[in-house]
Image (cartoon, rainbow, N blue to C red):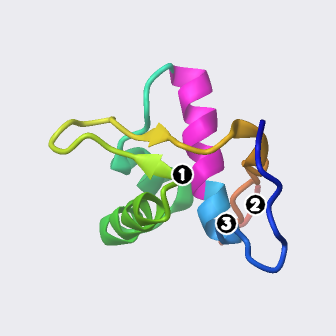
Amino acid sequence: MSIPQDPAFPRFTEKQGQYLAFIRTYLLLNRRAPAEADFQAFFQVTPPSVHGMILQLERRGLVRRTPRQARSIELLIDPTDIPPLQPIKTTVGGY
């Protein structure tokens, strides 16, 4: 049972929600947690951006990692509270 989220005080931002959705989707498809390189490729961002976001999610109590263990991200939030993963808008034309 999940606790309803107060819209005046969102538990996470839209961008953080997309990272959570990516983690959930990746886990469902691959049966293991994503590496930071997977986030970089999907969101088309730099390594420091990904690392900073993971640290923010950890500080907010939304995910947990095991220190010095690759692919150890665990979701600590009810999957029903995670928004659907949205397609990434790219600047590449012709698609």
The residue that disc 3 covers is 11
Identify the element where label 2 is drawn: loop
Closer to the N terminus: mark 1 or mark 3? 3
Label number found at residue 42: 1
- Horizontal and vertical percent position of residue 58: 41, 58
Position of the N terminus by quadrant? top right
Q: Of callouts 1 and 2, which one flags the residue occurring earlier in the amino acid sequence?
A: 1
Residue furthest left as drawn = 68
Residue 72 appears in which quarter of the rendering? Answer: top left
**Judging from the image, what secondary structure is the residue with disc 1 in?**
helix
Label 1 – label 3 distance at C-alpha: 23 Å
Q: Nearer the viewer, residue 63 or 3?
A: 3
Of the pair 22 and 62, the residue shown nearer to us = 62
Circles 2 and 3: CB atoms closer than 8 Å: no
Mark sitting on residue 5: none
**Residue 69 position (above or below residue 3):** above
| Mark 1–mark 2 distance (CA, rounded to whole Å) | 19 Å
Residue at 31% across / 70% down in the picture?
48
Neighbour class for label 3 at 10 Å: few (<14), some, many (≥20)? some
Answer few, some or many: residues within 10 Å of disc 2's Cα (few below 14, many 20 plus, some between 14 and 19). few
Q: Is residue 6 left or right of residue 57?
A: right
Please name the predominant secondary structure of the magenta segment in the image.
helix
Of the two numbered discs 2 and 3 on the same chain, state the one appearing first in sequence: 3
Answer left or right for 85 relative to 46: right
Q: Indicate the position of residue 73 as horizontal and vertical percent values.
A: 40, 40
Residue extending furthest toward the bottom: 8
Q: Determine which residue is flagged by label 2.
A: 94
Label 1 crowding class (10 Å Cα cut-off): few <14, some 14-19, many 20+? few
Residue 31 visible to the viewer = yes
Q: In which image quadrant can residue 71 be found?
A: top left
